[in-house]
Amino acid sequence: MLVLRELKKIKNFGCPVLLPISRKTIIGDVLNLPDPCERDPGTVALLTQGILKGAHIFRVHNVRACWETLKVISPLQPRLRVILNLAISADGKITTTGKSPAHFTSKADLERLLEIRKQADAILIGRATLEADQMTMTVNGTAPWRCVISERGRFDESHPFFHTEGGPRHLIISSATETPKLPATIHRTDLVGFLSKNRQPRYHHPSL
């Protein structure tokens, strides 16, 4: 929701904007739907809003419903088109409803994914994804920033993320809640403020 509200500011960076809005926890909270599979109508609502606000790429589960939405909106947004249709997980796994990781990529695919992640200056995820996937965001041989954004900063200090070696940890907390005492750099700002302050790459190669 925060990214959608601030999308105009984020677009000012001049980079394509990807919105991973499909079946997110915020939809379940608003509609009282604990089962992610029941959140497709809410996903379509966010998809529509994202299209009209000018986002470029969307990550979805129900391709048919979102494709039909895209076709209906196309007369109003003549530049819309599907460039690529694929299935991928940014951390190489899909989380089951029981909160356990269900690996679906081959070993070669996972190794390729980790190679791509090594090229990044930073990895940025939301707190809900951090907890649902039990992510640590470690990459062997390199140390991209490990960044997590949260509105209220309700982090679990026992989470493996805070007890696993890797790149510097950065927590972006946008609300005025008490700063948690965690082994990480705390940024009291929103996503736009964090990106504005840290937009220069730390390495010479292109950053994702």
Image (tube, rainbow, N blue to C red):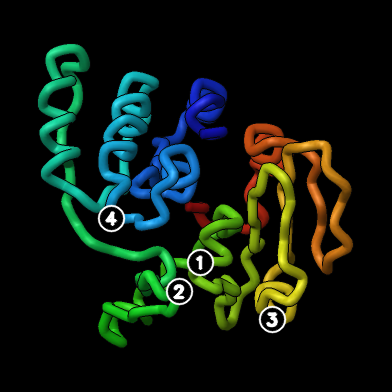
Mark 3 element type: loop
Which dot marks residue 99? Answer: 2
Location of residue 39 in the rendering, given as x and y in whole percent from the top left corner: 32, 46
Q: Amino acid at mark 3?
A: Thr
Residue that appears at 27% across and 48% down: 60
| Residue bearing mark 3 | 164
Q: Earlier in the sequence, mark 3 or mark 1?
A: 1
Q: Is residue 188 left or right of residue 61?
A: right
Q: Earlier in the sequence, mark 3 or mark 4?
A: 4
Snapshot quadrant of residue 146 = bottom right
Q: Amino acid at mark 2?
A: Lys
- Measure the alpha-carbon separation of dots 2 and 4: 14 Å
Mark 4 element type: helix
| Residue bearing mark 4 | 37
Q: Earlier in the sequence, mark 1 or mark 2?
A: 2
Which dot marks residue 132? Answer: 1
Q: Is residue 170 left or right of residue 8?
A: right
- Measure the alpha-carbon separation of dots 3 and 4: 32 Å
Location of residue 66 in the rendering, given as x and y in whole percent from the top left corner: 19, 38
Structural crowding at the residue carrying mark 1, measured as other residues with C-alpha within 10 Å and reported as few (<14), some (14–19) or many (≥20): some
Q: Earlier in the sequence, mark 3 or mark 2?
A: 2
- Measure the alpha-carbon separation of dots 1 and 2: 6 Å
Can residue 57 be seen? Answer: no
Q: Amino acid at mark 1?
A: Ala
Q: Amino acid at mark 4?
A: Cys
